[in-house]
Amino acid sequence: MRKVITPLLLALAVMIGAFVAAPPANAGFSVCNKTTNPASVALGYFDGTEWGSVGWWNIVAGACAELITPPLPARYYYLYAVHQDVGGAWDGDRSFCVSTGSFRIKGRRDCLAQGHELRRFFQVDTGNSPDWTENLAD
């Protein structure tokens, strides 16, 4: 009986190990909030024809959100994130339009004239990867 159980336990251990060590599924373009406070994230992009921006994803501390499903259609994306409750932002040097509520905006010029706000996004170079995860950290 002992000789039968040992190979079964070994096979079970190998199957569990393979499951645990399996690579994660493609994540598209995801943002993970590695801080201790929630963050709101907006995405800027070029779809091959025109620029646009979309938001907001509210990501609780320690969680991730998929902004674009795989495979990624472009190499460069742009992010702007606000650190809720404590203030501050992750920003950069690329201008895009945002709104206070949920939004999807075509174009990135004349934000104020269109009733939007102007924010400075930072560039993310995915290196043409089919999926990408960007981490927000303190």
Image (tube, rainbow, N blue to C red):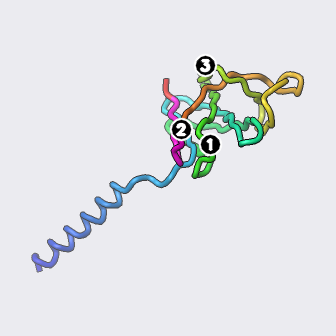
Q: CA distance from mark 2 to mark 3?
A: 25 Å
Relative vertical location of residue 107 with respect to residue 22 in this rendering, above or below: above
Residue under pointer 3: 88
Expressed as whole percent of the image width and height from the top left, the position of residue 72 reads 59, 47
> Would residue 133 be counted in the magenta stretch?
yes
Would you call the spot at circle 2 few (<14 residues within 10 Å), some (14-19), or many (20 or more)? Answer: some
Instruction: Determine the CA span between mark 2 and mark 1.
Output: 8 Å
Residue 65 vertical position relative to residue 136 in the rendered view, above or below: below
Q: Which residue is mark 1?
A: 74
Considering only vertical position in the picture, is 131 above or below 31?
below
Q: Amino acid at mark 1?
A: Ala
The answer to which image quadrant residue 49 occupies is: top right
Disc 2 residue type (three-letter): Thr
In the image, 99: left or right of 69? right
Density class for disc 3 (Cα within 10 Å; few <14, some 14-19, many ≥20) is few
- From the image, state whether disc 2 or disc 3 is nearer to you: 2
Q: Are marks 2 and 1 in contact (CB under 8 Å)?
A: yes
* Residue 113, percent from left and from top: 89, 23
Q: Give the label, 1 or 3, closer to the camera.
A: 1
Q: Indicate the quadrant where residue 102 lies.
A: top right
